[in-house]
Image: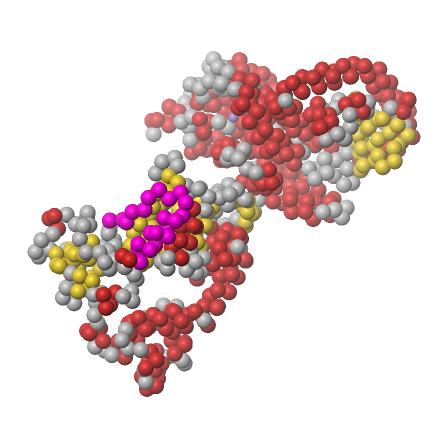
Amino acid sequence: MGEETSLIPKCEGMTPLEQALSSPNFPYYEHLRALLCSYLPPKAVEAIDRTFFVADFAHKEQKRASGEPYIIHPIAVATIIAQMHLDTESVQAALLHDVVEDTQINSKMLEEEFGSTVNEIVEGVTKLDKLRFHDYKEAQMENFRKMILAMTKDIRVILIKLADRTHNMRTLGALRPDKRVRIAKETLDVFVPIANRLGISDTRAELEELCMAAIYPMRYRILKAAVTRARNNRKEVVSNILEAIKARLKEANIEATVTGREKRLYSIYMKMVHKELQFREIMDRYGFRIILKDVDTCYRVLGQMHNLFKPRPNGFKDYIAIPKLNGYQSLHTSLVGPHAVPIEIQIRTELMDQMAARGVAAHWAYKESGSKTVSTASQKNAQDWIKNLIDLQQSAGSSMEFVEDVKTDLFPDSIFVFTPDGMIYNLPKGSTPVDFAYAIHSDIGNHCIGARVNHRVFPLSRHLESGQSVEIITSQGASPNAIWLSTVVTSKARSAIRQYLKGLRTQECMLIGRRLLQNTLRSVRIESLTEEQINSILENFGKQSLNDLFCDIAMGNILTVAVAKFLDPNSHKHHELPVKGTGGMPFTYAQCCLPIPGDDIIAHIAQGRGIVIHNVNCKNLRLSDRGPGKTLNVSWNKNVTANMEFKTGLLIELENRQGIVSEISNAIDIAGSRIESINSDQKDEKSFIINLVVTVRDRLHLAGVIRRIKSVPNIISITRRR
Ligand code: MN
């Protein structure tokens, strides 16, 4: 289509760099480009030039809250990604991350232009953006974070989301103060723990500090000034200890990088808040880091340090042998320095140091391997890393929980869905609303008649997806359906349904079958059938006993009419019909007005559809449909209708709130009615219209049902559907 080509200009005859240079926003891109050239091959930079051109073109009408051109934001996000030395596709996706959400370009166009990987990463980021983070309870946060990870097939989605959040936090100043605080709290609750979980401590630390500055601007300023002062006073002590360490390593002929370690403002603050230590005590601890070539040297250096300064009892931790949950590896030791100064030293390899800063992101770093499948190799690296961690944890005998944790976090074969009140359930992939209903409680599964997902009616057989909010509609009269067995995936649902069906065969089945047959036989009582009659029925239908026959009737294998006909081939002729005046001709009830006994009715002779019974006032029966030859005057035959049930339609307008649908369905049960079908539509922001079909005996019964429903709070109106 011509329209699409104008959204992504082809620019034939121009090199990608020329395209990029043609943009007035190129100066914003220049710095990122230099960074890319420092670690990516020219071909990759070329691909990113083109990506910049397209992203810039797409956002050209937009401005940031600060008034600057919008493209500054994607460029900044891509820069954070490039600082982690992530691969080409990550940088491309970072540049494009807001394109699908905010511009005319859709994901099909992205896939055609940049390939499926870039498109999938962008799609993932867009999907995460749609989740609302701030309105879930504290207790659910951990599950919520897991859900975000489970929704993410590609960890690069999270890395870009974190970079996106980092830049938004850096530029919070352009927003209203209340908005600043809300975003900062959300960041602290959701994104900081995720960064921590994935071991990306550089990002975590930056986010924490930005959050603190936004939430507690005063405390932040005061603490920052105090830390700067304290550091200046302690410079000399630090350099003395540093020299002592370096000298010792030189003596031992060990090549190492030694640095003094600055404490992060936020972690100082948290220690003070939790009263673990006072400001003075925190600042009086001196931290150092020694980076080495290999693991063996780490332990040798540990020995050297314990020899140089006196180690504190219980002050040693070996996170190399037993890494932290997020993969962090290092040796930590606490020592007593000159003049009894507390010293903390971290000892690790270069690789471990990179991992400590970038965590899982380190695995998507571009590597010059000469192979085309850099990202596949990285993916494998990440998996190996995790597998490695699992092995380590297991051999160290520590918690199985960790193994499960990492599995669900990073290799999602499960989904996370919400109940309407925000509880999160973890289900296997492919689960349906029925699985969800049984996961909550087997009673809910057994009485489930429908589901609403994100406030819309949702088929019971369709697969759920992570992030959806699922409401199960139950009815006390309802029971499990054998068809569910073909769609459920959880063993809990499967065995509960089987259990029910097994019980059904023996007990209720017989009762239901008997009742169905009695209804058809009408005046002929089953109890008064002669033994001869019974035997001939059983023989004819190939059954051992009446109970067997009833079961088959209930299961729908044998039709009751067939049994009735067998007993009395002329029976249907004497049959009285529920409506008098149709001259014995078959008829149906109109679906528009669904008449019930007590209503004034009229029979319409519809062409090709035979006789249809309408409510006299039915709007669908126009004047031209009425009159002699087109309608018959009919009435209810109370003798027959007394034992029957009829469907009728109700429209309920209500204010939406938690659980209202199940309260309505309860009210209907209590009134002795059944829900045949249910549909709902949003009317406006606050109210919904529910379209119900229920079964009743007559108008009197219906009045009772309506009274019951009205007793449910927040019902605005109930009307009969006509
Ligand atoms: Mn963004």
Instruction: Find the residue positioned furthest to the bottom.
Output: 532
Query: Closer to the camera, 587 or 674?
Result: 674
Instruction: Indicate how the structure is coloured in the image.
Output: secondary structure
Q: Is residue 119 visible to the viewer in this orientation of the structure?
A: no
Quadrant containing the N terminus is: top left
Magenta stretch: residue 271 in it?
Answer: no
Residue at (41, 72) in percent of width and height: 510
Q: Please tell me whether residue 670 is drawn above or below residue 207 in the rendered image.
A: below
Q: Is residue 604 above or below residue 644?
A: above
- Position of 242 with respect to 541 (left or right) is right
Question: Which percent across, then down, holds residue 332?
Answer: 80, 33
* Quadrant assignment, res 330: top right
Residue at (24%, 51%) from the top-left corner?
Answer: 592
What is the residue that sits farthest to the left in this orientation?
628
Magenta highlight range: 701-722
Q: Answer yes or no: is residue 653 visible.
A: yes
Q: Decide whether residue 713 is among the magenta residues.
A: yes
Report x, y in % for residue 493.
51, 57
- How many numbered marks, from 0 up? 0
Horizontal side, residue 156 vs residue 498: left or right = right
Query: Residue 720: x, y in percent?
Result: 28, 49
Instruction: Name which residue lies at 32% across and 82% down.
Output: 529
Query: Which of the pair 721/268 is nearer the observer?
Result: 721
Q: Is residue 1 left or right of residue 220?
A: left
Along the horizontal axis of the image, is 212 left or right of 247?
left
- Residue 319 coordinates in the image, percent (x, y): 77, 37
Q: Residue at x 41, y 23 (%)?
A: 9
